[in-house]
Each structure stands twice: as C-alpha cells, then as structure tokens.
Image: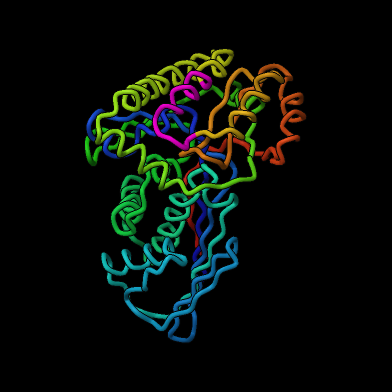
Amino acid sequence: MIYRSKAPLRIGLAGGGTDVSPYSELYGGAILNATVSLYASATIEPLPENKIVLDAFDHKTKQSFDLNDSLPLDGKLDLLKGVYNRIQKDYQFPLTGFKLSTFVDAPAGSGLGTSSTLVVAIIGAFSEMLKLPLGEYDIAHLAYEIERRDLKMAGGKQDQYAATFGGVNYMEFLGEEKVIVNPLRVKQQYLFELENNLLLYYTATSRESAKIIEKQSRNVIDKQDKSIEAMHQLKQQSQMMKEALLKGRLHEIGEILDFGFKQKRQMAEGISNDKMEEIYNAAKKSGATGGKISGAGGGGFMIFYCPGNSKYNVIEALEAFGGHCKPYQFVDHGLTTWTV
C-alpha cells in the first residue's frame, strides 16, 4: 500500500498578521484567505528494511535513519521529522520501515503558507496510513502545535486551517486556543472575476518569515501603539473584504488591498523594502488599483488587483523586475488523502 495526501496553498486577502501571537490572544484576530491550485504533497511507502527514509524532492534533500520512535531535529527536514515524532508520541504506532516523500509547488519562504501546508499534508498521509480519527479542526490544531510548539517556529495560525479546510474562509482567532472557520458562500461569478483580475506575482526572492514575525510579536509585547493600531486596522480590513466579496462589490477590492498594504508596513520593520515598494508602485502606475505582500513580507509573492483588462499592462511592467506571474485557480477543497 502507498498512502498519499495533498493540501492547497493559500492567498491571504485581508487581515494578515492578526492571527499571530500575542495579538490574537490579547485582541482577537480575523483573516480572510482563499486556497489555490498550488499544493504540498506527501507520500508514505512501506519499506522492507528497518529504515526511515525522508526525501524532500523540491529541496533535493534526502536523509536515512535506523528505525526509531524519535528522529533528531538538526535543521534538516525538521518539518518531516517533527510530524513523525509527534504522531509516534501521541499514537505509538508499530515501528516498521517506511519512506516519506514530499514536494511543494512553491518555494519555502514565498508567503503562501508553504511550511504549514506541508505539515498538514504530512499529517494527512500518516492519518491515512494509520486511520487516525482526526477531524478538520483536529488536524489543523495538531499542525499548529507541531510547528509552533514542538519545533518552536514563529508564525500565525491561519495557514494550517486554510490548508485543512480549503475554499474561501473568514477565520476568527479568539483567545489562546479558539479558532472559528467560517466558509464564505461567494458566488461563482464573483470568484471567476476575482481570479481573472488578481495577479499572483513572484518577486524571485524568499525570506525568513520567522524573523519578521518575531519583530511583529515583540511590538505587541512592548505595546508599540503604531504597530498595534495597524493590526486593528487590518482586522477591520478583513471585514471590509468579506462584505465586498459576498456582495459582489469587486470594484472595491483594489482599494481594500491598498488600504491593507499601507497598514501592514506599520506592523514591523522588514515587511516591505525598496524593491517591493518599486514593484508595487510600478503595478499601480500600470493599472492595478491595489495589492499586498503575501505572508509575513520581506520577499516572496505579491498580489495585485487589476480591474478590466489592466492585468496585461501590469504583467508587462513587472517583467522589468526579474520575477514572474504564477498561474493559479481558486480551489474549494482542502486536505485530501487516499490509498493506492
């Protein structure tokens, strides 16, 4: 038997950063995101020998270990090891040799939630193999605990839930543990128009999101008013985006994104930089009405809302910056697992 899973990456549309501790615990966060046709995939194959083989095809990294109920965390393939260690600790399944292979359709540090989505996909593959009784909230919460607590990686809560549930969701983060995922029934014609007008642009740079997120968290702890007020405004932005999508007021989306872009820069140093500002201004001069930096910022993907047929002028203008536009479709499914 071979056990497979895949989970979709996400585009954050509004509220980004309000899912990060300690802001979400102190004030409550709200985010609107949508999953797209880019995936993290995981496969588990039994092996005849007593070995654990980890193979991340996208990173061209492979490691092999003697059978053990805990793998060493050394900075190499720690996401894969972290999931195995936690599943083995919680469920104590019989130790037999296996190979875990993974692949992600976007580079690490690109702002589409790659790390968390990969953790969800790996949990999915183990869940399929072991027939674990885990619901969507269980899987997302387990992924959050593995990444943030077991592996001590800084970050928010939205990505694990987006990858598990899929679709367009308005998410609320209340207190330390409570997360409510509200699926939005956006009319298909509105989603098609959003998909048509929203450019996903890769800046050809990646960044270490943890450092930016740590600064953002520190600003909340230190009661930096400018940073906290920016997060309040971004939480409000997610409400604005939800209303615009549900009511089909797509002409407002560019302005809502632009509003969020201005606020997000206030959250922490390093979210934007000279090159990203230049790219943003070039896109707006060419017809985009707004946009945002995806994820924590500092590099990776940016998105731009281009009404009418302005996206063709924007694509042409962005060619000068060495990145590329990535084709995608919105998808309404989350984590999917199956056995071969």
Image height of 278 relative to 165, above or below: above
Image height of 251 relative to 169, above or below: above
Q: Residue at x 63, y 23 (%)?
A: 281
Image height of 254 relative to 66, above or below: above
Instruction: Tell whether 278 sits left or right of 7.
Output: right
The residue lying furthest to the bottom in this view is 49
Q: Residue at x 34, y 49 (%)?
A: 144
Instruction: Tell whether 172 sits left or right of 9.
Output: left
Q: How is the image coloured?
A: rainbow
Q: Is residue 172 magenta?
A: no
Instruction: Tell whether 40 sits left or right of 308.
Output: left
* Quadrant including the C terminus: bottom right
Q: Which residues are magenta?
A: 257-271
Q: Is residue 261 magenta?
A: yes
Q: In the picture, residue 214 is in which quadrant?
A: top left
> Looking at this view, is 313 or 271 the one in front?
271
Q: Residue at x 42, y 32 (%)?
A: 16
Instruction: Tell whether 281 sits left or right of 45.
Output: right
Q: Position of residue 5 (x, y in %)?
A: 50, 57
Q: Position of residue 149 (x, y in %)?
A: 28, 54
Q: Position of residue 158 (x, y in %)?
A: 39, 39
